[in-house]
Amino acid sequence: MTPFSPAPDFLQATLAGHFGQTRQWHTDTLQLEWLDEGVLAIAPRQPLAANLDCVLLSTGIHGNETAPIEVVNGIVNDLLAGTLPLRCKLLVMLGNPAAMRSGARFVDYDMNRLFNGAHRQQPQAQESARAATLERLAADFFHAAPAGSHRLHYDLHTAIRGSVFEKFAIYPYTDGRAHQREQLLWLESAGVTTVLLHSKPSATFSYYSSHHCHAAAFTLELGKARPFGDNDLSRFGDIDRALRLLLSAATPALPAYDASRFALFSAKYDLLKHSEHFVLHLADNVENFTPLPHGMTIAEDGAIRYVADGGEERILFPNPKVDVGLRAGIVISPCQLG
């Protein structure tokens, strides 16, 4: 096989539609394969161990969340250039290239509501076919993981609105498995100490890989969504360094888990939009994790009223403009690990 690289820049190659010209190639140290548009599998040509960890980095599930796309692109480009060594098996996914090209969150439907089989309910949306493809490729990748290897999935995002805690993680429902303290410690090394422990299945990509592939999976919200070229990537230095270390070196010693260093929350209930009469009694610019005073009417939908209780609740992902039947926000409250 002749050494070949389709372009010096992974992101630009994807946006330009270069996928399909040459599917497999290698460098002096890496074996590479385009699996689909914006999906690149990378592995060391000479594995250092029989049970190499398997890491999935996904980003661009929402096409306008560009900073993590740029962070991951820089990592891939350094791997291709040989300036960053690779000591695991890596699958990189730029989730929604069509939306990325247009600078939109999505084209037809929010892709991060289409995983775990939910794409079958929206057959008209182009994101549905893409979500099904990403599910299949993720499952193939993790199911081929060697015995004894770690399966890790970090789905990188930025948020539509500001946040009381700029960076936070969503730990998807674990189907009864224990939460992994070592993963929380790794998140801390990446500058993320606020974590929502989800309490039920969802249609997100991280829940899909957690549920179906038994990966340690997280949705990472890393700041505010901005267009390509408008990001201050210095604000993403912690996650960039942590990912580079994860991919290139043995896991460093982590400190003992100390609950006082983390702000952990659990999801209490969703604000469901049952009809077009839904009204959210929060300012349009309300930030994620804004406290909800006891007795406050959060939202109304006809005879249904959502009222804050206890004074420790907060709001997450408020969005009254979603379609009827979808979640218009999550009410959360502080919690501790069991």
Image (cartoon, rainbow, N blue to C red):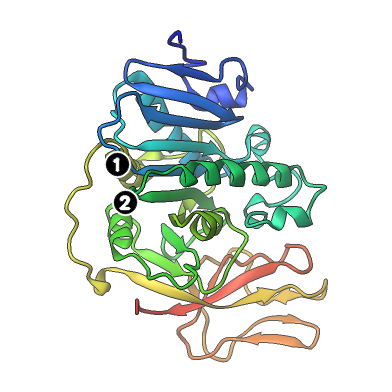
Of the image marks 1 and 2, the number of the one nearer the N terminus: 2
Describe residue 292's horizontal placement relative to residue 126 as left or right. left
What residue is pinned by disc 1? Answer: 241
Q: Secondary structure at mark 2?
A: loop
Picture residue at 23% right of the left edge, 38% below the top: 249
Q: At label 2, which amino acid type do we have?
A: Ala
Q: Secondary structure at mark 1?
A: helix
**Residue 226 in sight from this viewpoint:** no
Residue 190 is tagged as 2
| Camera-side residue of 104 and 147 | 147
| Camera-side residue of 42 and 84 | 42
Please tell me whether residue 130 is drawn above or below residue 184 in the rendered image: above
| Camera-side residue of 35 and 328 | 35
Q: In which quarter of the view is residue 13 placed?
A: top right
Determine whether label 1 and label 2 are within 8 Å by CB: yes
Q: At label 1, which amino acid type do we have?
A: Arg
Please tell me whether residue 39 is drawn above or below residue 263 in the rendered image: above
Q: Horizontal and vertical percent for residue 124?
A: 82, 47
Extreme residue toward the top, this view: 2
